[in-house]
Amino acid sequence: MSNEENTPSVSKNPENYDVFDKQALAKYTTDTGKILLRKYTGLTPMQQRKVSKLIKKARHLQLLH
């Protein structure tokens, strides 16, 4: 197996994010861990809901702090 298969690909489309994409989800949180508002992220309502759910799942799995 190569390293490319083990590392998750970071897509620019938030609908393709995964719970394990820490760097991608970190763009949508503040330094204290709060989820940024839609007016700051520029996401559509559906994308914002998906990103919020992914961040909450990652917190539950203790991947994000």
Image (spheres, grey):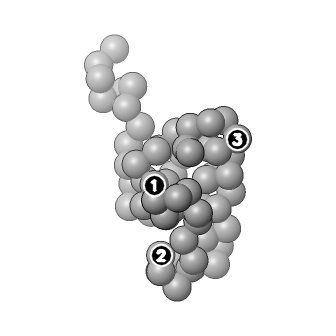
Callout 1 amino acid: Ala
Q: CA distance from mark 3 to mark 1?
A: 15 Å
Residue 55, given in percent of the width and then of the height, sits at: 61, 53
Dots 3, 1 in contact, CB < 8 A = no
Label 3's element? helix
Horizontal and vertical percent for residue 13?
A: 44, 63
Residue 26: % across, % down: 45, 54
**Three-letter code for the amino acid on which mark 3 is drawn:** His
| Residue 58: x %, y % from top left | 62, 43
As drawn, the label of residue 41 is: 2
**Residue visible at 57% across and 77% down in the picture:** 37
Give the mark nearer the N terminus: 2 vs 3.
Answer: 2
Q: Where the C terminus falls, by quadrant? A: top right
Whole-Å distance between the Cαs marked 2 and 3? 22 Å
Q: Is residue 31 rendered to the left or right of residue 2?
A: right
Residue carrying label 3: 60
| Residue at the bottom extreme, as displayed | 39
Corner quadrant of residue 12 = bottom left
Kind of residue at badge 2: Thr
Q: Secondary structure at mark 2?
A: helix
The N terminus appears in which quarter of the rendering? top left
Q: Is residue 58 above or below residue 11?
A: above
Label at residue 36: none
Residue 14 in sight: no
- Mark 1 element type: helix
The residue at the point 60 percent across, 70 percent down is: 48
Q: Is residue 39 visible?
A: yes
At horizontal 68% and vertical 52% (from top left) the residue drawn is 56
Q: Nearer the viewer, residue 32 or 45?
A: 32
Mark 1 sits on what residue?
26
Residue under the point 55% across and 57% down: 33
